Amino acid sequence: MRTQSVRRRWWIVAIILTGVLAAALTAPAADSSPPDPTPDEVKRRLKELEEQVDRLNHESRQHEVQIDNQIRNPLAQWKDGFYISSADNRFKLRIGAYTQFDGRFFVNDEANQNTNQFLIRRARLDLQGTVFKYFDFRILPDFGGSSVQIYDSYLDFNYFPEAKLRFGKFKPPVGLERLQSATSLMFVERGLPTNLLPNRDIGVQFFGDVFDGAVGYQLGIVNGVPDNLNPTNVNDTNDDKDFVGRVFALPFTSTDLSALKSLGVGVAGSYGRQGGNTSTPDVPTYKSTGQATFFSFNGAVTNATDPTKNLGPVIASGQRSRVSPQAYYYVGPFGALFEYVYESQEYKRDKKTATFGNDAWQVAASYVLTGEPASYKGVTPFRPFQPLDDGGWGPGAFELAGRYGEIDIDSDVYSTGFADKTKSAHRATEFVLGGNWYLNKNVKVVLDYAQTEFADGAKKGNRPNEYVIESRVQLAF
């Protein structure tokens, strides 16, 4: 770089001298031509040339120093995580993480169907960044389970903010609460509609915001996964793919109507064909707030005495579609969220086929007692927690929340022999009350009480009600 700069300076000097010489040679030879310059004038001109060269040298050195600083002196700081970037912001890296230590304790569990336990619900390292200005990425591994899983791993091309491209593994744009970060949830667990929605999938997505951020959209094509599943195997067994899409609008975000600025409404959906097999049926299971499985399809049945009565497992085979109208509303310390999901799916068991329609909905609301504004991205306390003996008093932020929801599984699953009425409930209705304490923007404590009632699912009538107390201590940055 410095060698090129030196060459450039001498080229400039050579051009100037060549120009002076050419002017002297081409000047008309007439009696009226000016006299030859005096020695003092020659010295003055040479001094001016030297000053021009010095100025060019100085500007070149300043440019080199600026480039060197951009390369050798990146900016590093703490910005909701460890953040480092080049001086021109063309390269960025943010290292974040979050961990959730949960407690799950069941009340009146006389049949001992569930286990009281402490657990690490999530422990995720969040790597986000930018390379060459127009390429954003995210890698989100989870270490909280029995094995490491990759939840997000994608690359965005963001040359046009209104029309970005995403490649990799990400959340399909269908469920409103599913798209909300796990660190920003009102409750320890998501609501019942999440059972009918995809968790993560692998594919390509076209997305962006238009009309000054008033409307956001996503359109994508993905492999297609069973409900509420994070695919861990990159080998897709189905040639068909799912089309997913969502439009979500904030119609008053740019107006002076402050009470409606954070009203959002939208609709999302998916369509595709599933092609499971006996080894990979691709059928879902559905869970309660306490993460107990209350519905599953029948598996294979072997009759040792009469093989003609053997039955294969239920397989997802054929069209699947979802539609989900959704909305949220935030004003001051109050927040509310609503979503509905309807899903239709074709299934097969041996030579028998059937189509089942399932639906679920929920309404959730919260109120921040300490006055901070509620939002889809969570609450940031005005006065973070600080003891009196540490130079002052800060209580953090306190929030109360409630949720009511229901999921209905098509009762025809029983009459067709695709599910067992004595083992799987076809309806679950939940009611949840919760309290959240935001000590600061990074630490959060959650305490919930959830009650779920079931229809069917036991040898004699209904599965016993579930009463569970759930707690969480969360660190996120």
Image: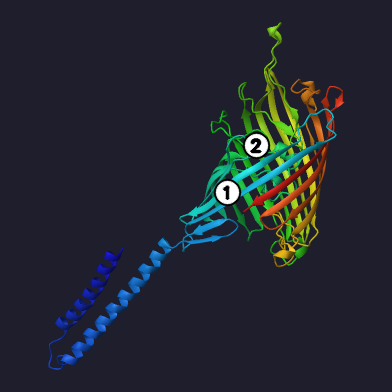
Say whether residue 20 is left or right of residue 296.
left
Say whether residue 21 is left or right of residue 89.
left
Residue at the location (53% across, 56% down)? 160
Rendering coords of residue 181 (x, y %): 66, 48
Instruction: Specify whether residue 110 is in view.
Output: yes
- The mark nearer the N terminus, 2 or 1, is 1
Q: Amino acid at mark 1?
A: Asp
Q: Residue furthest front?
A: 389
**What is the secondary structure assignment of the residue under circle 1?**
strand
Q: Nearer the viewer, residue 259 or 443?
A: 443
Q: Is residue 345 above or below residue 85?
A: above
Q: Amino acid at mark 2?
A: Tyr
Instruction: Specify whether residue 33 is in view.
Output: no
Rendering coords of residue 262 (x, y %): 73, 58
Can you identify the residue that label 1 sits on? 126
Can you identify the residue that label 2 sits on? 271
Say whether residue 67 is left or right of residue 265.
left
Q: Is residue 47 above or below residue 351?
A: below
Q: Is residue 53 above or below residue 149?
A: below
In which quarter of the view is residue 466 placed? top right
Rendering coords of residue 19 (x, y %): 21, 78
Distance (Cα) linking label 2 and label 1: 30 Å
Camera-nearest label, 2 or 1 = 1
Residue at the location (55% across, 56% down)? 82
Q: Residue furthest right?
A: 461
Rendering coords of residue 306 (x, y %): 71, 6
